[in-house]
Amino acid sequence: MKYYITTPIFYPNASPHIGTAYTTVAADTFARYHRLKGDDVYFLTGTDENAQKIVRSAESKGLEPRVYVDGIVERFKALWDELDISYDDFIRTTEERHHRVVQKIFTKLYEQGDIYKSEYEGWYCTPCETFWTENKLVDGKCPNPDCGREVELLKEESYFFRLSKYQDALLQYIKNNPDFIQPSSRRNEMIKFIEGGLEDLCVSRTTFQWGIQVPFNPKHVVYVWLDALINYISALDYPDGDLYKRYWPAEVHLMGKDIVRFHAVIWPIILMALDIPLPKLVYGHGWYLSKEGGKISKSRGNVQDSFELIRRYGSDAIRYFLLRDMQAGADGAYSEDNLVERLNSDLANDLGNFVSRSLAMIVKYRGGVIPKGGSSTNLEEELVALSQEVIVKLEERLEAHDPAGALENLWRLVARLNKYVDETAPWTLAKQEDQQARLDTVLHTFAEAIRILGILCSPFMPKLTPKMFQQLGISEDLLLWEEAQCWDALGEGIQVARGEALFPRIDVSQFTVEEEKIAVNEVNVNKNAEESVKMVPSEGVVPEKEDFEPIKEEVSIDDFAKLDFRVAKVLHAEKVEKTDKLLKLEIEVAGKPRTIVSGIAQHYAPEDLVGKHVVIVANLKPAKLRGILSEGMILAASHEGILEVLTLDKDIPGGARVK
Ligand code: MSP
């Protein structure tokens, strides 16, 4: 199956930003998914350079338009490289191959009477590069809800394209092909718009010379939208090129909702007039909005440096956030806080932790060699059934161009896997002689799960999969989509190679950020008591970037003396209901009972702790966790996913000081 996907070609009047990146990252994800499925993919992106606003931006910088755009196009390409955008072609509308096709089409449409010469008198919005009639303006300004800027009055000789002639045919086409424009809300908007009546479109300008000349009247340059839309076939070398024959019509033109109108009205009419097939789908996604609510855009000046964001968080994390946080058919909320929260919760805690703990246990209990799996129980069968359900949904959501829905499903599997670790409690199995075959099955299941997650994550986070495979000790030849269905693909004797944490947890306070930004640790403490336990050093399930945490800043002996460490005897322990990580411990300190809630349930069965003499911080301010007052903190050592509570060998009574 062939799969031709395009992004809009972006105006290089300023560097690309996170909003622009969304469309390109989403298109890349779909392209990668189809390649993995074995489809013949062609992925096109590029830049739209022949616009009047480019001339204005260049002038304001005192540069020739050509010099100006060359610099910015390099920024686009550099950003796409950093984000691992696997485009097959990058078209620039200043290229000769594009000019040639636009001129040929303009001439053909003129010769067949679909383009005619007349005079345009009306308004023009340069930021939107759009013509407006007087009655459409809002308070005399651009009616585009995202713009609202000043418009200019134009009176010039122009060529016009007969949109009106094709109005009925287009309407009929949209009605007969309900999947042509998606999501359906955009389709309904377009139907209404067309039913309101199409006016012929002005398709040339004479007041500036930057652009593609009308071949039979060089006073005119072709209107930028007619010029730009043609990129989707000029890049394929329309009409005789092999690429054109192989890939046209496109499976999908992906774009933001702002420009669906051009793709669902002007573009199909150009194609109808040329008598060539229409693209199968025009998909208009929402926008990323800033904290304040407006669209992230260069003109609003609310963009952050994308290169700096990638440097801070890594390109996979940026991709994950963008893809995960815009629900299908809706807008997404971008802020650096949201990004960090996603990174810490979904990537560091859920995915990263699962991989790190699983590999740590394979190392600890089997010397790093993935054991052969034995007979499975209900737990493994449930897991396999869930993974099959998740893959079906994931594929369905990707086919529907809904990356957020796809990831949401995939993370159901990640959550289930973390639960599987707790349910199977390998640390308990490890202590029982007669449970070694069971432990083998569990560890083998961990390894298969890492491999499967590696495959399923790969369209979304292309840097991650090779890292996961490398840590698992397998080659990238196993990166085959259909292998994600199989839970017994790993041969015997594979040696894992634990590496650095896949997603180190981020503490935003390490960056110079706006003053009002709350460190993510504080956010978590306030938001969710259970989360706050993750900050307790004893919990230790959060992977660290280095092998060891850096030693903290020096403190004085007086500071140290403020902390009161005591021996405590564990009288009773139980799991806190509806949590995976918390244990409620009843302890005795100096003859008095106390309750401590500790995030160690993934490492200890409650009965393992009863009777032990542990060490606690006895004068820590009590805090409520899941409605239970926790009066202190248990000390534990942790490293690479393994955690040991500090205990005393000799029978020193609860209450004794530790100094
Ligand atoms: N040059 C035209 C497109 C011509 S296509 C034949 C254009 N360029 S643009 O640089 O303004 O890019 C607009 C597109 O960038 C949007 O349609 C969308 O794909 C993407 N986005 C720009 N800002 C965005 C957000 N804040 N959020 C999501 N997508 C955003 O229009």
Image (cartoon, rainbow, N blue to C red):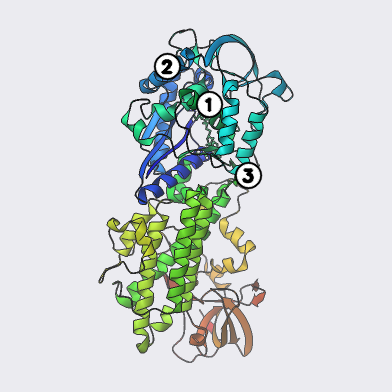
Q: Residue drawn 38% across and 19% down?
A: 100
Q: In this view, does 187 lie above or below 627?
A: above
Foreground of the two, 236 or 551: 236
Residue for badge 2: 103
In terms of secondary structure, where does tag 1 sit?
A: helix
- The answer to whether mark 3 is within 8 Å of ligand 1 is no
Residue 379, visible in the rendered structure: yes
Residue 435, picture quadrant: bottom left
Residue 116, picture quadrant: top right
Residue 56, given in percent of the width and then of the height, sits at 53, 19
Amino acid carrying mark 2 in the image: Gln
- The answer to whether mark 1 is within 8 Å of ligand 1 is no
Amino acid carrying mark 3 in the image: Lys
Foreground of the two, 502 or 120: 120
Residue 86, given in percent of the width and then of the height, sits at 37, 42
Residue for badge 1: 269
Asked whether the beta carbons under mark 1 and mark 3 sit within 8 Å of each other, the answer is: no
Residue 417, given in percent of the width and then of the height, sits at 46, 69
Of callouts 2 and 3, the N-terminal one: 2
Count residues near mark 3 (Cα–Cα under 10 Å), then give few for <14, some for 14-19, many for 20+.
Answer: some
Question: Left or right: where does residue 516 sit relative to residue 391?
Answer: right
Q: Residue 181 carries which label?
A: none
